[in-house]
Image: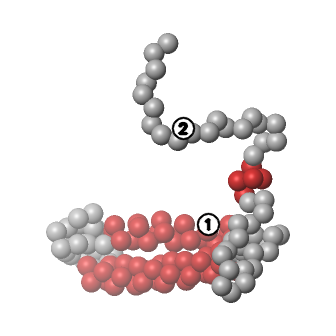
Amino acid sequence: MQTVIIVIHLMLVLGLIGVVLLQRSEGGGLGIGGGGGGGFMSSRGTTNLLTRTTAILATGFFITSLFLSWLANYERKPSSIINSTSPAPISQPGSAPQAPVGGLLDSLKKPDAPAAPSAPAAPQAPQSK
């Protein structure tokens, strides 16, 4: 369903780009060449046709954009950023908060990894070998 709407949306985009490029601008641009005369369509008729076509394609583009955004939001599953497997620690009023037992860093430690050396208490001078 979503793929079909995306294909229709892209076809509307390409059509809209083409129709906008065909329109005559103040400076001439890529618009349909001038020349008066009694051609197939007069300048006024071509302007009305291109303006109407642009409005129809823009409306279709707007509708498919809204539908695609609604569809993306509709298919989204609700999720929680809170870890529901371990409850939050509850502290008593007036007491200091306690650190949770077995935090995230503890779970990432490898059991066979050697303990990291402790840092020196004060800065030490470089020693030569």
Q: Earlier in the sequence, mark 2 or mark 1?
A: 1
Where is mark 2, residue-wise?
120
Amino acid type for the residue under numbered disc 1: Val
Specify few, some or many for label 2: CA neighbours under 10 Å numbering under 14, 14-19, or 20 or more. Answer: few
Q: Is residue 115 above or below residue 65?
A: above
Specify the farthest residue to the top: 129
Specify the farthest residue to the left: 27
Q: In the image, which is nearer the foreground, mark 2 or mark 1?
A: 2
Q: Is residue 36 above or below residue 48?
A: above
User: Is residue 49 something one can see in this rendering?
Assistant: no
Where is mark 1, residue-wise?
7
Q: Quadrant of the N terminus?
A: bottom right
Q: Quadrant of residue 89?
A: bottom right
x and y percent of residue 3 in the render? 68, 67
User: Is residue 116 something one can see in this rendering?
Assistant: yes
Q: Nearer the viewer, residue 50 or 104?
A: 104
